[in-house]
Amino acid sequence: MRITGFRTLQTVQEWGRPVGDANGVFADGRIPVPIILVDTDEGITGIGLGPHADADAVFAAIDGEDPRGVTALYDRMLRHRFKTGHAGAVFGTIGAFDTALWDIKAQAAGEPLWRLLGGRDRHVPAYASGLDIGLTDAELVAVYQDYAEHGLRAAKLKGGLDVDRDRHRLTLVREVLAGAARGPRPVLMLDANESWSRKQAVRHVGELERTLDLTWVEEPVRRWDADGLAAVGRGIRAAVASGENLSGLEQFRPLLAAGAIDIVQTSAVWGITHFLRVATLAHAHELPVSPVGNTPIGLLHAATSAPNHLAAELQDLLPPQGVFVDAHVEDGHFVLGDSPGIGIRIDEDLIRARPGATARGGPNVRPDWAGRRLLPVPEGMPVPRHRTGVVRPLPLRQADGK
């Protein structure tokens, strides 16, 4: 079997509501979803969801190769783009190709990837994550009621802009999940998306922990700040989670060596080989691993073989437009199907016929005041909106009115 070519597509995730985090919000709830398809001379096509950056140059590393040598090809792609491929969008492109190769390998074997990788159980524990910072109270309750109806008893909320508002919203979601069924009390997490300084993080979480039990706080400070993450961990009761924006083992190593994180995360767009290696590194440090991202189907298959997998993020309950996934959510778990490969089918005609989405602003742009706010950000204004006439929060140098 040989790799003969690749194609790219871009579809859209239609949330039907605002989605975002402390850095910004997509008001229309439309998020672009890039796709890479890898073709072979035996008619098997593999699918990976992830960026297209530098795709031609990355593909040159695997063109004509046997796709079943996927882990060696992953390293080959890294070597071919060693000056750009260990970070950012190019690392995501390598991850998308890697996912597509694993898909081909499992299809060629006639097995779902979870079984090919040695998984014993097709059920993967999940937690709800609504990217919900832009929602009203009523919208928030409705969203998490939907999650609760699918058996979810753990939820991660976006926050970090106003401690009183965060407490209120976490309490609302706790009541929704607690009221859905009898049993253990709900699990709550808070994701600040790198929006705090070290002291802001400790004060904010410490105030929440007066009345709430938080299981983890995600990305309280910058992702690479090993000393800062460790300092936050010492100052709060909750675990510290991070890693979704780290790429390559070289970025995880100093954080784990410093004892900076308690929950090791990896993003779905970075690929399956990356996840497996990070999971092994975390396991060597006696730490759990948790996949992050929308439609993380490839990592769900991989998670079944990771002895230290904790839970995987469940964002939207529906896949992107034109993407069909052989998996469903039941009793708080992703349930993987028996389709050979990773279980994704693409309707290319449907995707090409519908308009896509353009990611501008929103949570992809870090506000200039992140990590240096004196006052809470007013409700309803999670990010600066210069063009709409909304006044942004005063920076510290103006806080005295001068």
Image (cartoon, rainbow, N blue to C red):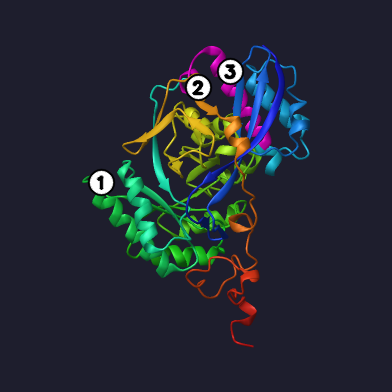
Q: Which residue is mark 1?
A: 184
Residue 100 image position (x, y, % from top left): 61, 26
Asked if labels 2 and 1 touch by Cβ distance under 8 angstroms, the answer is no
Q: Amino acid at mark 2?
A: Leu
147 is within the stretch colored magenta: no
| Distance (Cα) linking label 2 and label 3 | 8 Å
Q: Secondary structure at mark 3?
A: helix
Q: Residue 391: in sight, yes or no?
A: yes
Q: Which residue is mark 3?
A: 105
Query: Which quadrant does the C terminus fall into?
Result: bottom right
Q: Is residue 49 left or right of residue 144?
A: right
Asked if labels 3 and 2 touch by Cβ distance under 8 angstroms, the answer is yes
Extreme residue toward the front, this view: 353
Magenta part of the protein: which range?
A: 93-116
Q: Is residue 286 left or right of residue 365?
A: left
Q: Is residue 216 left or right of residue 76?
A: left
Q: Secondary structure at mark 1?
A: loop
**Quadrant location of residue 49?**
top right
Residue 261 image position (x, y, % from top left): 51, 48
Residue 197 image position (x, y, % from top left): 57, 64
Q: Amino acid at mark 3?
A: Lys
Residue 398's disc number: none
